[in-house]
Structure formats: C-alpha cells, structure tokens
Amino acid sequence: MQTRSDASLIRLEGIRKVYTTDEVETHALSGIHLDLRSGEYVCIAGPSGCGKTTLLSIIGLLDSATEGAYFLKDKPVTALDAADRARLRNREIGFIFQAFNLIGDLTVFENVELPLTYRGIVTGERRQRVESALERVGMGHRMRHYPSQLSGGQQQRVAVARAIAGSPSILLADEPTGNLDSRNGEGVMQLLGELHRGGTTICMVTHDPRYAPYAERTVHMFDGQIVRDDVGAPMGAEVEVH
Amino acid sequence: MTGIMRDVRLAFRQLVRYPGFSVVAILTLAVGIGANATIFSLVDAILLRQLPYPNAERLVALYEVNPKGEHNVIGPANFADWRQQSRSFEAMAVGIERPLNFSGAGEPREVRAGLVSSEFFGVLGVQPAKGRFFSVGDDRENREVVLSHGFWQRQMGGDPAAIGKTLRLNDNPYTVVGILPASFQLPGSNAEVWDKFHLVPGDRKNYGRFLSGYARLRPGVSVEAARADLSGIAKRLAVAYPEYGAKWDATVVPLREALLGDLRLPVMLLWSAVGILLLIVCANLANLLLARASGRIPEMAVRLSLGASRRQLVQQLLIESLVLATLGGGLGLCFAFWGADLLAAHTSAAAELKMNGALHIGLSVVLFTLAISLVTALLFGIIPAWSTSAMASQGVLRSAGRGASQDRRRSRLQSGLIMAEVSMAVVLLAGAGLMARSFWELYRVDPGFRAEQAMAMRMALTSNKFLDPTGQYLMRARLVGFGDQVLERLKARPEIQAAGIINSIPIGGPRSYTSIVIVGKPTPELGNEPAAEVRTIAGDYFHAMGIPILKGRSFDSRDEAKSQRTFVIDEELANQDYPNENPIGRHITIDWGDILDGEIIGVVGSVRQSGLKTPPLPTIYWWNAQMPTTRIDVVVRSSASPERVANILQSAVRAEDPDQPIAEIRPVESILAKDVARPRLMLLVLVFFAGAALLLAAIGLYGVISYSVTRRTREIGVRIALGATPQAVERLVVGQGMRLALWGLAAGLLAMLLGGRLLNGLVYGVRPWDPISLVSAAVFLGGVAFLASWIPARRAVRTDATTALRQE
C-alpha cells in the first residue's frame, strides 16, 4: 500500500557543499535541488565519490551546506544552532548506517532506547516503543543481548529498530546492506520495504544495483550534482548528464 | 641473556621513539622514587638503624617515675643507690648538659658542655680518637675536659698536641685529656666539650632530681628484667626515704627509643605519605601503558605469529618498564640529594631530624632506591604487560563489536586504577588538610605572653668573678648586681620600653619543677603533694614579656635580699590551690634544700612554659634579689628593629663586663617559631606530597577520559546522529569521569575514617576525623576531577559526527 502524499517533507534548494583544506577546495555538492515527499521511498545512486553520503549528511542535519536553503516540513532549518539541529534530528530523522553503529557497551534494548532518552520520554512509554520496534524487526527475543552476540544481519535489524523507535518523519539509510552478505542484505531490504508499505518515508543511498529497484524513485548523482531523477528507473540505465 | 640484552636495546629504542611519553614517565617516576629515597634516609636513621655505638641494642636510658607516672630525671643520691644495688647493668652513668663560658681564645663565648660521670663513655663503648677519657670510678672534681672533634678543629685548629693543653672554662683552667672521634654523636645533645660530673651522694633533698641516666645491660639480661630490678630498688628507696621518694618508681627504656622515640610517628607518617605517592605514580604509569597497549597489539600479534611465547612478550614489556623505572630511579636519587638538603636547611626541626645520620644519602639509601625502582617497575608494568600479551594472543578482530570486549576489559582496568589513584590522593589531601588545621590550631594558641617586639639574650653568669675568694661559693650580691646594672643600662635607652630577667624563658628554656606546700591547707599524703614550676625573675620581666598582672603587684624595691621572701604565682596555681579565694597574703613553702617560705604578693597570667601543645603548668616566680640565678635570659620589649635592639643588648653587657660571653640573642617570636617548627615542616612536606598526588591523579583521570573520548569517537558520532545535544554529550563524558572520581573519593574517605586514629599523636586541637578537613579534601578533589573530565568533554562536543561515522 503506497501512502505517498503531495506534501513536501524535505526540500533542498540550491545546496552547495565545499570542503576547504590547506590549499584545496573540494566541491562535494553543487546546486542541488531536491524535494522529498512524505511516504516516498527514494534511492540516491551514483558512483563512489559523487557526493551521495555528503547529501545524506546534509539531509540528516549532521552537516551544514555551504550555500542554499533547507526546509523541513516547510520550515527553514539552515540557521538553527547545534542544539536545535540535534533536537530536530532526534524527532524527525532516523539513521541506518552501513556499519550498524550499535554501541557495544549497551544491550539491544538500551541501543534502541537511546534516541528516546534524548527526547525525555518517560520510562513506561520508552519501554513500549522499544519493544514494539524490536518486534517489528523480528528481534524482540534478543533484548538483553549485546551487539557482539549478534550476527551482522541481526545487528542491522536492531539498528533499523533504533531508527524507527522514535517514529521519525523519514528514515535515512546509508548503504544499509554494505556490510552484509546477500541473504542478510535481502532480509534488511525486505524489512525496509515493509516499513515503507506501512507509511514510512525512506531515503536510501546505495551503489548496489540489486537493491535500487526496492525504491520507487531513484535520484542519480555524478560529480556532486543530480543528473537524473527517475521514478522507478533502475540503476545501470543510461545516465544523462546535464 | 642475549634475549634480555636485545629487549633492553629495544626498550631504549622505544624511549627515543616516543620522547614525550618517555620524559613524562621518567619525570613522574623520579618524583615518586626521589621522595621515597629522601624520606627513607629518615626512616633508616630513626626506625631501622641502631645507634652508632658497639652493641647499641644493650644500651638503655634510666628514669625515675613520678607519682603521676611520668618519666623524670634522676636524683644523684638515688643513682648512687641504684649503682650500688643493681645487678642488671655492666656499667651505669649519669649526665647533664650545661653552659660553660669559654674564654682565652678570641671572643668569649658560651659552649654547651656535657657534664658526665666517669663511666659515661665506657657505657657507650666509645674509644677516644686521641688521649683518654675520665678514669672510671674517679668522681673527683679534677678539672679534666674531653673535647668533641668539632670543637678541637674549630677552637684549637686541630692541634695534634692538644692533649695536655689548658683551656679556660668559666675562668677556670681545664686540662684536655681526650678528643672524641669525628663520628661520635649523642642524639639530642649539642655538647662540644665534656666535663666530669662531681657525683656527691648524700642528702637527697639538697640535690633534687636533674640527671639523665644511661646504662649498658649485662649479657643475658633483658630490658624487662632490668626494669623489674630497678623498680624493686626504687620501691625500697621510697620506703626508706618517704619524704623524698614516696610513690616514686624507676624504669628502664632502650636508649634508641628514649632518644628517637618521639620522632617515630612523624617519620612513619611521612613514609606512608611517600609510599602512597609512589603507588599513585605506579597507577598513573600503568594507565599510560594500558592506553598505549592498543597501538602495540599488531606488533605483539606479529611477534606471536613468528613464534614468540607469551612469556617472551611479557618479558619484553616488563624490561621496557624496568628501563623506565631505572632511569626514573636514577633521576630520583638526584632529587633525593636535593630534597635532603632542602629538608636539612629548614629551621630547627631539621636539627633533630639529622640525628643518627638522617638526611644523609648514603649506601643504604642508594640500595633502597635500586630496590624500589625494581618494585615500581613490576607494580606499574605487570598489568599492562599481561593485558597486552593477552590481547595479542587472542587477536583483535575488526568486525564491529568483537573488539569491544578487549576494550571493555582494558577500560575496566584503567577505571580501577583511576579510582585507586583518586582514593589515595584523597587520603593525602585529607591528611594535609588535617595537618593544616592542626597547625592553625597550634598557631592560634595563646602562649600567655606577647612575643612580638620582644627580644631575649641568654647568658651564663659562671665566671670566677661571681665566686667568693675561696672560689667555692657564689657571691649572690655580685650576681644580682650584674643583672641589675645591665637592666639599668637598658632602661635608660629610649628604645627600650621594658627590660627584665628570667632564668628560663618560656618554651625555650629548661623546666624546673618542684613540690610545694600550701600553708594553711591540709597536708596531702606523701607522693600527692602539689607541685609547681619555679622561675627566678628580675626587673620589669612581666611587662617585658607582656604577661598581665591580674591581682596584687609584681616585685619592686620592697622585695630586697633581706626582706620577707615574696612570691608571685600564676593564675593556674591560683585556680588550682586557691579556688574561690584571694591568694594575696597567703604563704607557700618550697623545699629547695632549705625550706623557703614566701608570701604571695601577686597573681599573673599563666604561660605555656613547656610548649604550645602543653597546657600551662602552675608556676611560682621568685625575685632574683632573694634567690639569684646564674643562668639568665634578659628580655626587652622594643619597637626598634631587631638588629638595633641586639646591639643595645650587647652594649649593655659589654659595658658591665667585656669578657662576659653572650650565648644567644634572638627574637622571642623565634622561640615560638621553633616550637611549631616540626608541625610546620610536617605540614609543608605533606602539602607538597598531596599537591603532587592531586596533580598526578588529575593527569591520570584526564588521560583516561581523554583516551575514552578518542576510543568512543564513533559512538559519540552515533549519539549525535541520534539527537544528542552538545550538553548531553558533555554530560556523558563528564559523568563518566565524575563517577570514577566519586567512587575513589568514597574509598579514600572511608580509609581516612578507618585509619584516622593513627594520626592521634600528631594533630593538635582537631580530631583525626575532622569533618572540615575531609569535606574540604573531597570538594577540592571533586573540583579538580570535574576539570580533568570537562576538558576532554569539550573535545567530545566538537566531534564531527559525519567524520566520526566514517571512521573504521
């Protein structure tokens, strides 16, 4: 069941990102215009070094653009300070990383609970949300385990549970299958598909052509620019450079 | 051996490759080991080494024991009976120190003379370097003198023909019969020359008690047996002479304990403090090595894969620690020389600390330093060596989470070491705080007189001009006249506000304590007589010393030599023996050879005669004109500079007698300062150690938290990605540091509460569990711990989440 709406969730206008080191300026992103709508499942594709992860970092409020405007639910976020960005990130965005990034000293339950503790949610409600999220990803029976006791696929499932526990507006997944074998990768992609069908907005970065078709829209990037924005276009199709 | 030499070479290469770490480690070790070496020189002299005499363990001190159970000096008549009746001793001797005026060579000066019975040197087992000692058994007064090596060098230029030569002491010719070896020392004595004590057993009452006793046990006789023997004799004498000795006893104490015993507790405290400091140094270094361990694991893993055993890995790492510790120990020994000189130069407290060769960095200290360097290397090296080799042998897997268990184990070790450091730092801080409070309480004690703007000049009026033509008896009029003339000259000076004389200045002078009879009160039973300190004064002494006159009057022209004898008593005596009544006009009787009856004419404020720590003792003052003294301190009050006042004092004496030696001129404040010199020294040393401990603990905590932030960079990036605000990240890091610190604080405070009673003998005016000291230490260290955690927390807040999440 698709629940895509016409409401703009995240809108980027004229985003540029320049990294400056001693003598070198690296233009990671140039003139990015992107509109992500509620309920969409977007894949950002492109060769290595094209700026996919930089774009995802900016969308996820982990990094700031050098130039351009960013609107989240039609509200500008460019001028927010670090604390406000953190609060916004906590409420609206859920991250899934390639390397899982679970915290080794915390149990599965505590890892999933972590973003909820930053929001100040009371204990009872936190417990409910954590258990619900873990059940949703099929990891409810491993709440007391530590990440080191789980397989790669299980760790990524827990990472997904952590991302959805706070009911964010959008899930950002950066190469979510990059550290997994094909079977586990398929499993995680199936999970993301289920979440999307349930109404979750997903923006995924991947360079694996097997998983791009899971998305309903593919944004192609090259050399820091969006070169094509296809609805349903698979990877490997001819890329038009503008 | 080849393997060990290779490991040593590799160790030096490591030191050169990481100069920053090496310098920090070696300096830290040097401070810890150097402090231990310095204090060990005290420990060795005071606690371990025997006195420098043959078979010193057989030497004992003899005491009478007064009815209060206190050790007391000995009466010559009692000593004579002990010597006759006891079967426990090979030899027995007595002695007393007194000032003699040395003249005839340069400026006349006072010398300290040991007046000893003929067996004295035989008891100690000392042999003369030149000549002979006094003939044993010959107690006649035949004006022979034995010189110390220092006096022989200074006053006679080391004259090889000194034996048989004549010196003038108290205007009398003395023949030099012997010279002591350069190594001779009697702890607690400043004697430069040794004169024979003319022991005249006889009427007990005429002589009182004033001698120190020494003896050498017979072979096979224990201290306890000798004590029982002497006590039995004393009890028989008490029955035979009840007026003199009722309820008196006698005891025997090992000489080492008698001379050095009261230094035992302070030296133990200092040794404990440096021991704790060294443990903190070891914990710090262990943490540093643990932090470096993760970087060495690939190297160790390669060595293992090439065939090295775990034992060989541990050996290599321990040898690196040993090289560090040896270099640190060598530098520490240099620090010890400097530290010993520093302690030795610090006021008069060092004079007693220099007993028995203390503060001398000799072979024993060098060997101790070597041993402690080895132990230190083991202490700080074994945990990191074992841990690193374990991690290398298990291998380190790169997959996320699997390296976490090794990290957690290392992290727990580091946390444990930090908590131990903090707890030990708290103990030192609290101890320093206690000493500071104790010193402050002591400093605030009212001595009973005003030391500021008062100067004292000490002299001994012992020259022949004060003797009658027969040379046997003192001319009282001349003694009194000399003092009065000097005072008149002083009072004529506009700079001098008041001038007086006393025979034994408070705190700085010897005690003179005797039993008294309060006329008109029921006679107490023998052995329970009231007692009082007795002081001779002249001039305007009370005004000069700022002692208030509370009732009646002080001595004046009405109190002449032939007048009715008068006394002034102090408030302590008035409250003790005349509670709720006016003592003015009442009489006291003192048995001073003759029975002296005196009328009380005044009451003055009490003075702490024996030191700031000792409460005031009941005191009777009598007038020099009626009971002249040969030993005087001239005290003046003046607002002029000390140098000016000293010149005035000297001029007044020279005008009366250019040949009268002056022993010492000093501000009265310096006498007070000398009384608090030892607690001040203890405080300074403890503050230094506590400061070093605090710095080390703070550096250690900072290092551990900083390392933790580095290790957790990715985690912090994840937390930021999940919405942690900068404040939340800061709380995370500071919270980690403060948790460690709080556990350490709790452990340290518990240790102080449990062990505080060990400090009972060292603190004054405060309890060892003084809450102000404990809370202050905890708050101070908590503040430092916060700072040590906050600095890396700021770094954590600045973590770039994007970069952190990309880290492998």
Image (spheres, coloured by chain):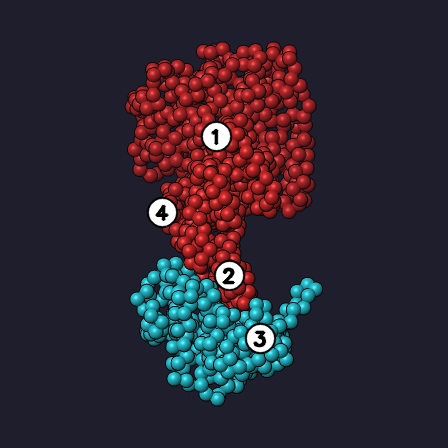
Chain colours: A cyan, B red
**Image mark count:** 4
Q: Are marks 1 and 3 in contact (CB under 8 Å)?
A: no
Q: Which is nearer the N-term, disc 2 or disc 1?
A: 1
Residue named by callout 1: B44
Give amino acid for label 1: Asp
Residue named by callout 2: B713
Q: Nearer the viewer, mark 3 or mark 4?
A: 3
Q: Which is nearer the N-term, disc 2 or disc 4?
A: 2
Between B517 and B306, the one lying in front of the other is B306
Q: Residue at x 54, y 70 (%)?
A: A53
Measured along the vertical axis of the image, is residue B748 above or below residue A242?
above
Cα separation, mark 3 vs mark 2, equals 30 Å
Q: Residue at x 65, y 32 (%)?
A: B653
SS at mark 2 in the image: helix
Cα separation, mark 3 vs mark 4, equals 70 Å
Left or right, B673 with reference to B579: right
Same chain for labels 2 and 4? Say yes or no: yes
The chain containing the residue under callout 1 comes to B
Measured along the vertical axis of the image, is residue B532 above or below residue B164?
below
The chain containing the residue under callout 3 comes to A
Give the x, y percent position of residue B692.
Answer: 53, 47
Give the class, few, some or many, for how many residues have Cα within 10 Å of label 1's Cα (few <14, many ≥20). many
Cα separation, mark 1 vs mark 4, equals 28 Å
Give amino acid for label 3: Met
Q: Residue at x 31, y 29 (%)?
A: B247
Q: Are marks 3 and 4 in contact (CB under 8 Å)?
A: no
Cα separation, mark 2 vs mark 4, equals 41 Å
Residue named by callout 4: B754
List the single residue furthest toward the bottom.
A6
Give the class, few, some or many, for how many residues have Cα within 10 Å of label 4's Cα (few <14, many ≥20). few
Q: Are marks 3 and 2 in contact (CB under 8 Å)?
A: no
Quarter-wise, where is residue B484 in the image?
top right
